[in-house]
Image: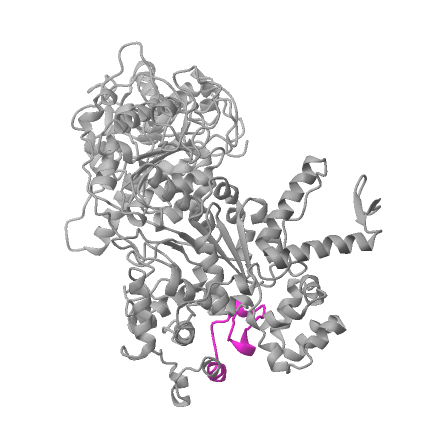
Amino acid sequence: MTAQTDPQAGAGATQVASTDQQETREWMDALSAVIDREGAQYAHALLEELLEHARQNSVDRPFSANTGYVNTLETSQEARCPGNLEIEGRLRAYMRWNAMAMVVKANRIHPPEGGDLGGHIGSFASLANMFGAGFNHFWHAESENHGGDCLYIQGHVSPGIYARAYLEGRISEEQLLNFRQEVDGKGLSSYPHPKLMPEFWQFPTVSMGLGPLMAIYQARFLKYLHARGIANTENRKVWVFCGDGEMDEVESLGAISLAAREKLDNLIFVINCNLQRLDGPVRGNGKIIQELEGEFRGSGWNVIKLIWGKGWDELLAKDKDGVLRKIMMECNDGDYQSFKANDGAYVRKHFFGRDPRALKMVEHMSDDEIWNLRRGGHDSQKVYAAFHAANEHKGQPTVLLVKTVKGFGMGKIGEGKNTVHQTKKLGDEDIKAFRDRFNIPIPDSQIAELPFYKPADDTPEMKYLHERRQALGGYLPHRRVKADEQFTAPALETFKAILEPTPEGREISTTQAYVRFLTQLLRDKEIGPRVVPILVDEARTFGMEGLFRQIGIYNPAGQQYTPVDKDQVMYYKEDKAGQILQEGINEAGGMSSWIAAATSYSTSNRIMIPFYVYYSMFGFQRVGDLAWAAGDMQARGFLLGGTSGRTTLNGEGLQHEDGHSHILANTVPNCISYDPTFAHEVAVIMQEGLRRMVQEQENVFYYLTLLNENYAMPGLTPGTEEQIIKGMYQCKPGIKVPATGLRVQLLGSGTILRESLSAQELLLSDWGVAADVWSCPSFNELTRDGQDVDRWNLLHPLETARQSFVTQQLANTTGPVIASTDYMKAYAEQIRAYIPKGRIYKVLGTDGFGRSDFRRKLREHFEIDRHYIVVAALRGLADAGQLPMTKVAEAIAKYGIQVDKINPLYA
């Protein structure tokens, strides 16, 4: 053998050319003998040892992570399906029919105003065999002896899942007729939505990419529960169905290395490789299966490819020269799509016709027989064998790359065509063709009615359907609404140290208050073990490094090294039973772990209390789609946005300074959000959160923004707890009767409330104006209360009108109302409608991009500091006719305010 330079491959690149064919032949004959005598597994092990020997002798060139474009499992390696494949085929046909009928009916029946309801037929058509294998033989429901498997089902295949549930008797015909018609409460959600079908769907997956990401962390969380002795999860599996086009989402592949690193052998990805996205080929010029094989195997996964059905076995067995395998590799995905969009004659000419030897291999076959050479995903036996191999594999996560045809069985209207994803309307002739292909017992006379088909309960098919599910513990998908466990939230007095004023000379931040709350909660013998602190590599930023030694960082391998800070009290301690989930620099991963813990009451019948703390700017902005999914999943837990506000995190700059996370938080209906200023507010809000989410098992989650700014804490004023929770209380009244008789109301939250308190002093000392200061921990909750009151008043015109909480709080006050926060003006603007009639309301906020500087300078730049609050208050009095406008001008001059600078929104 000689090595010669390839001028096309770049400097130093080489290619190997054989100059001794006899030697090469001898090596190949020797390997063939090993395969024949000892088997493929032994031969593989031998080659691995040879490769390692080569590496040790400086032959370090990487080898491909890809295998040939054939099935991973040889026919002799396939586990035989123990079920009745004939009956399964009939059941599958009925489900195909009902799924198709459901979608077509939804788009034939128009309300008076018209409009289609949409839906998808092609996706389920491509993987019906896979769902059949899973439901009949592998997927366990929760039972006395099994915690139940987790199924992440592709969103676009929901009609097929409903079709199965209809045969099982879990969904009625009326519900099928109301597919995508949910307002009246009789319909079925378009996609998997736990919020809309709380006892059915486990996980929302139609926001593509999120399902694969969340599933990896779900599988890891099951291992976490087991390692900590909270639940026995050793037999449970997480099955994840994805489309090959979906794998282009960065989230889909973003955490596959974690799955391999932590040896998540309870995780199985099934990637439906029908080679099509919504608009066309996934990789027209390439091979998506080969690409994904390299990605997953390179990351340490067990990869099983199922490409060809049993019709190809005989042809491949005859392929002694590797001609057929060569053609299979040469054809790209665009070619394979064309083969399925045409007919057998086309395949004979354009596939087998690439080599005369391949053409000769099929000369005895008719065009129809060639056309019926199926892809692996449509061969029930091979699907079973692949699932079985994945289910039994230990030590690694497994990915199944299964080749299918999108729209399988839809014939000329869609099978393998670019338009199939959008196909939702079929004519009567198309429906007849569909019926004939799957042998559905519906006569021509009923085709126009498109009836659903359900065999009698005493037929072999229906008996088999129920027997298989009973053997696996019950029906799926199924979702637990509440945990069987019951906990009582610790009383507020438990957190007394956080509720009291800080000692004279002592200052703390609300982040420190949160850490003290969490530390106290961890000491609770009942609830403490259920706390799940989640960090994304910022523990020291938030003052949480003390927890490392106290409760440890979860690592399934333990700590196999001596940490560099071992001699310190708060050293970095990893442990097999550690309680902290340290996700590294990975907000999406942290959120996915939080979701797994926050929904554990449902997935594992164990109430867990996750606390995920992160830079607030990197929270809702970066993982907003996951937060929305968490709402759909009815998550329960705490999200903590640390170093919040646009002017608080001095020195960090534009991409760190948060002025809008509360705007984003308010978009999630079951997210309860607060921007507290004081330690006692943090304690009151979080204790109430524990009561609602843990004790009462309400389907809400909490978002609190925290500060890294230290100051003295005033302590809780008894009697204000309920007002804090509702979002507004008077924290410091002004003098009762100023000499001028002038009074204003100052509202604030977070760090800027302290500027309102300073403005209160300036207004009195400089201008003789009294100011009452109100802490508003949640303008969002105040807004929701006001909107709820508005709705009630609108719908009850003959009853006494109700008042919003904001109106009630300000009803007995006088003067203009000035609100200032560290967030966009839109945050406080939300309550404008609820300010008592006739009162002037002015809002200051931090619209615009953040920037780096000292806090004082930033607050001056964004026009929210004490001086601007004073000017706004004086302007409000002037607008009300209580003060001459010259006083406003005096204040502007007195405080050196630049009137001609660029608006911060555009600066």
Q: Residue at x 30, y 63 (%)?
A: 471
Q: Position of residue 35 (x, y in %)?
A: 63, 57
Figure quadrant of the C terminus: top right
Whether residue 845 can be seen here: no
* 760 relative to 261 in the view: left or right: left
In this view, the residue farthest toward the bottom is: 445
Magenta stretch encompasses residue 436:
no
Q: Position of residue 398 (x, y in %)?
A: 49, 51
Q: Residue at x 45, y 62 (%)?
A: 156
Q: Residue at x 64, y 71 (%)?
A: 315
Q: Tell me if residue 292 comes above or below residue 109 in the rendering.
A: above
Q: Tell me if residue 668 comes above or below residue 683 in the rendering.
A: below
Residue sitting nearer the eye, 184 or 599: 599
In this view, the residue farthest toward the left is: 799
Q: Which residues are magenta?
A: 407-433
Magenta stretch encompasses residue 426:
yes
Quarter-of-image position of residue 286: bottom right
Q: Tell me if residue 475 comes above or below residue 788 in the rendering.
A: below
* 829 relative to 695 in the view: left or right: right
